[in-house]
Image (spheres, rainbow, N blue to C red):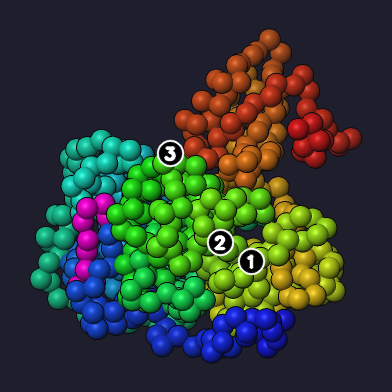
Amino acid sequence: MDVFSKKPWLDLYGDMPLKLNPKRDTVLDLFRDAAESSPDSIAAIYFDRSLSYTELDRTSEALAAHLVGRGVGQGDRVAIILQNDPQFLIGMLAAWKVGAVPVPMNPMYRAGELKGLFEDCTPRAIICYASDCGVVQEAMDAASISPAMIVCDPRTYQSRNDERVLPPPFALPAGYVSFPEALSEGSGRAIPRLSPAGHEPGLLLYTSGTTGKPKGAVSPHFAMAFNGTSLGIWCKLSRDSRILGIAPLFHITGIVCHIAAAFTQGAALILNYRFEPNSMLDAIRETRPTYTIGAITALIALMNAAGAAKEDFESFASVYSGGAPIPPSVRDEFLARMGKLIHPGYGMTESTSQSVFCPLGMKAPVDPDSGALSIGIPTFNTEAMIIDDNGAPVAPGIAGELCVRGPQVMIGYWNKPEETAATLVDGWLRSGDVAVMDEAGWFYLVDRKKDVIIASGFKVWPREVEDVLYTHPAVREAAVIGIPDSYRGETVKAYVSFKPGASAAPEELVEYCRNRLASYKAPRFVEILEDLPKTITGKIQRQALRQRT
């Protein structure tokens, strides 16, 4: 439904265009425009250091030349396994400049998790931290690949060394090329100036599909340029904006709503390595950001940080949140205490971030039936509808699966034609989320169609955690569910039964998982049962376990 053809959206936005046509087809070209028109403008702020658009352009050119010298070229994949620091931005730009496809990966992943991703995308180059070389090398060996490696130090480009967020110094292991060495080797070497086409793959980002196994969503360059430009208009960003990067850059929100939003506007992006509320609050006070978007848990943490006050948020012109449901009470508390209205939004990796957003300045309504806060209305050039189990559209007020269609939708899943066909149907992206639309065109996310757990905005698939639990010598049965968590939205709980004569403390099982999974995937609670509830066919009943909580 085209909600922009009716009020109150036009009343709110006045001369905002009904349809959007970005002036460039790629974020790289929009970045180059900014670097050429305002070379001295700040592109990134990292603790006590700022980098201009010229410096980011020159540095990424040197890294691109190094990549070319290591055999990286058109269509190759470049894995970027970093937190929120300038080297991430430089790596993305360098990959685009040689025609390669960036593949951001979570630096919290362990070797077993990285192995599967490496086998799937076969990166030609990997950019990671020195402290992670052992884990990355183990995954490379297990995947039988030997890409070029560029090893970074998170303390580069700053001198504050904030121990609240930055790890201790870690020496470069022998035999690897450091980030400064790569820049030195590539500096001054001329490479062809490439401008990828808008329809070509510009990003490969892994998400979880119906099986729980990672799938690489391939977004075209135009999808990122479109959503970055769209966000700029939607949130009224400009070259003078200062974007607070609280979402991880290896997540679609960070890539589009931080990096693309900044580069398409020529704005400054404030980076802080990773989210830590007290350090982030100091960054807010020092840099005075004007816009941010992140998980509701991050905003809650900022609100509750020691000494946080309404004055700290005065510089913000817009605050958005997505990735996990927002309790209406939290939205209202943040407004009362911090003086800023949190605007909900909805997007997926498969939709290259936002597809449904709350208009700036509007207080999203609450669904009277479910109590859910609205996720907003479709963004520019985007259609959304609710369908039933037969694929037919339903009337307003009827719950069904949310589907979206627009220029930001992915090309498909990397090397997975069957999964692509099941998710992209007649041009529509089937989200797998249950939602409802009201008569005024507001959308509400009221349930989750599958068993995925959303913890602090990250997806956790029960089966992946269960598979790890089953490797423990004492575990006979395991089942994992999500339970409500006032801070994270949901958190992971595991139920286990033991083999005859075996036992283990819940704390031991939690630690066992933490050593083998990213921390947000590991269960925070473990309950021991003699037997887990099952169907007549022997399948463990997660629903019965949910009813116990």
| Distance between the alpha carbons at the discs numbered 1 and 3 | 28 Å
Residue 380, compared with residue 429, is above or below; it is: below
Q: Is residue 50 magenta?
A: yes
Point out which mark residue 341 bears: 2
Where on the picture, by quarter, is residue 28?
A: bottom left
The residue range painted magenta reads: 46-54
Residue at image coords 58%, 43%: 488
Where on the picture, by quarter, is residue 198?
A: bottom left
Q: Amino acid at mark 2?
A: Leu
Q: Is residue 391 left or right of residue 505?
A: right
Viewer-side residue, 121 vs 244: 244
Residue at image coords 84%, 67%: 398
Q: Is residue 249 left or right of residue 394?
A: left
Location of residue 377 in the rendering, given as x and y in whole percent from the top left corner: 66, 73
| Distance between the alpha carbons at the discs numbered 3 and 2 | 21 Å
Residue at image coords 55%, 72%: 360
Of marks 3 and 2, which one's residue comes earlier in the chain? 3
Q: Mark 2: which secondary structure?
A: loop
Q: Mark 3: which secondary structure?
A: loop
Q: Which residue is mark 3?
A: 306
Location of residue 173 in the rendering, given as x and y in whole percent from the top left corner: 21, 39
Q: Mark 1: which secondary structure?
A: loop
Location of residue 180 in the rendering, given as x and y in whole percent from the top left corner: 15, 54
Task: Tell me, yes or no, whether the two marked residues, 1 and 2, touch with CB atoms within 8 Å.
Answer: yes
Point out which mark residue 363 bears: 1
